[in-house]
Image: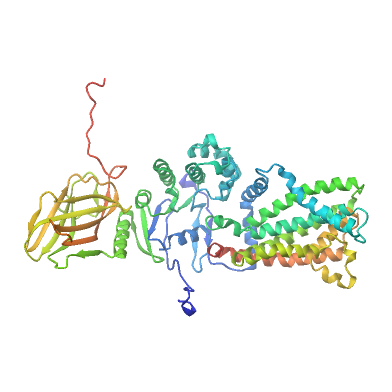
Amino acid sequence: MPGANGGPPTEFWATRDVTFDVPSGSAAGIIGHNGAGKSTLLKLLTGITAPTTGEIRVTGRMAGLLEVGSGFHPELTGRENIFLSGTILGMSRKEIHRKLESIIDFAEVRPFIDLPVKRFSSGMYVRLGFSIAAHIEPEVLLLDEVLAVGDAAFQEKCLNRVLELKRSGVTILFISHDLRAVERVCDRVLVMQRGKVVHDGPAVEAISAYQALRGAAAGERRVRHEKQQLTVDAVRFLDAEGREPDFGVTGSPLRVRLEYTAQEKLDAVRFELLFIGSDTHWKTTVHNGDNRLTVGPGKGAIEFLCDPLALCPDVYQIDATVDRFGAEDPLDWLIGCQTLPVQSPYAVKGCFQQPFTWSVPPDAT
Amino acid sequence: MGEPFTLPQRSVRVIGPAAFSPLGILRHLWDSPRYFDLLLTLSLHRVKVRYKQSILGLSWALMQPLALMLIYTVIFSVVTKMPGAGEAYPVFVFAALLPWLFFSTALTSASNSLVSHQYLITKVYFPREILPITYLIAAFFDFLVASVLLGIMMAWYRIWPNEQALWVVLVMGVAVLFTLGLSLLLAALQVSFRDIGLALPLVMQIWMFACPVVYPLSAVPAQYRSLYLLNPMAGVIENFRRTVLQGLPPDWASLSVACWVTVLLFPLSYGYFKYREATMADVI
């Protein structure tokens, strides 16, 4: 509802008509664009803000983790802040006394624990903050972007702690932009858009839906040569059996097929597919750059065989470009024309699975 | 970790829209003991932080009443003579400054407590009244420290308290409840209207002269006295001085007015506070 005199809107529903259940002991994720209503939902669930209408039922002790170092006071020592932040997050003093040593060890700040936290490095600060939160032992745990703290090693440690809590039967609701972390933690993911749940399903499926949404929001953009000599019709993925899989598997073969229509005979044509990770960085490309093709007129296709697929689990956005040797503008250029979720049967770290063999050398006895 | 098969009946918490109901107040009071540890830790923290990295430390709690006592003594007993205050003006004014400073320190800091803790309010849930209450406790701690000095001063002037001094528990009880009621109201209002924090220092200066701090109650003309005593702090301060310093029984007329105002104010302001609490994080 626009305000009088064209002022700011007087009414805005951050979330509306959102209904879902998270059964005890399961882990659900919520993803969505900025402003989709994720944080508002968390605030409602934690009781920070009351809903205008509707009702939320929470069974068991709930802990919300919307930031690390809640309530830290810079003048107090690390030890004093453990008590302060711990009680703010809902632990009793007795409970904190019991877990004090474990909290200090997990945060790796033992030599500095009796210094004021204003003298802590930012890494020490967030480690201590997360460590306190990690010791709450809730029955229901709400997580915001808090895992994105500290260096990579500490992030991994945080994620493992969350997975450990999950194994021990804690119900988890995880709200994040880090799709890989969401995929690792959650069995089920809800996608939110403009305050509503638009998709609710298994993690991989929901992440593809989100990626599709993201593509749609950006508009599957197309930059085409004005003569329209060549059009990319589709990009498909095929597994070893020739079926179109829901996702690629790290270490298994994957064929990528690009179909096009050419209006006339064109020489020195180069096809390229770009793989963009959820962090928006280019991860790899496949192309026929060293062996240009003469195509058309009519329909045609080119297939790239990735054997094995070296990309690690993530959801990739695919851009397709077709250009001609010596020409400035591409014949066709599709941005975000496909999404490719990749999974792995094993825990893999990093961006790529480097093919390797191993042996014990004869000189090492 | 508990065994999943033998989980006891778990509490179900229902979060619903904000409601202003008198029964809600009872429920909030019922819930509050669970947060006792938080209240304790935060209050300790207030006292600790205030005197960290200061050389004089705790003695700062005495500076304000001592300095004010010296100023008023110079003005009202050296420069000009305040009638009816008795011979020992320093102890006369100091005894009144104790409850007054408790009230003014607690009210000023507690009214600001929500606004100054935005970073907590928007990130963690706990009953918000804990924040103003911790400032009240910190101010009460200062009051206790300064009370020791009052004892020393009374001994110096050879004023010995009698059994009437026990009424001080009731008098301070009224003072604490009145301060809490007003703090909750002003803290909740300040979430939307920052004017309160800006106006309060000035209001407190004026308010002090509307209380029998530097002058005795008898100096107030009799025809205005009932109007004057509608200010609960006037009743509190007068009775504090009567019972502790003068060894007289409480003045029931003024004390009961203070009680009534408090009894009426407290549920209203606490109810309003809890009603505002529901959407505080969005507005603050």
Taking the image as shown, residue A264 lies to the left or right of residue B69, namely: left
Can residue B176 be seen? no
Would residue A211 be seen by someone viewing this image from the given angle?
Answer: yes
User: How many tags in the picture?
Assistant: 0
> What is the basis of the colouring in this image?
rainbow
User: Residue A338, image x and y in percent?
Assistant: 23, 58
Residue drawn where x is 77% and y is 64% of the image? B207
Q: Position of residue A172 (x, y in %)?
A: 43, 52
Q: Quadrant of the C terminus of chain B?
A: bottom right
- At x 42%, y 56%, the residue is A22
Between residue A348 and residue A334, name the one nearer to us: A334
Which of the 4 image quadrants contains residue B155?
A: top right
Left or right, B174 with reference to A264: right
Give residue B48's position: percent from left, percent from top: 66, 45
Horizontally, is B177 left or right of B34 in the view? right
Q: Residue at x 22, y 43 (%)?
A: A251
Residue situated in front as seen by the camera: A91 or A313 = A313
For residue B201, what is the image quadrant?
bottom right
Residue A193 located left or right of residue B44? left
- Between B52 and B233, the one lying in front of the other is B52
Give the residue drawn at x 41%, y 63%: A35
> Measured along the vertical axis of the image, is residue A5 above or below residue B197?
below
Residue farthest to the bottom, as pictured: A5
Between A130 and B47, the residue placed more toward the observer is B47
Give percent across and percent down for residue B53: 65, 43
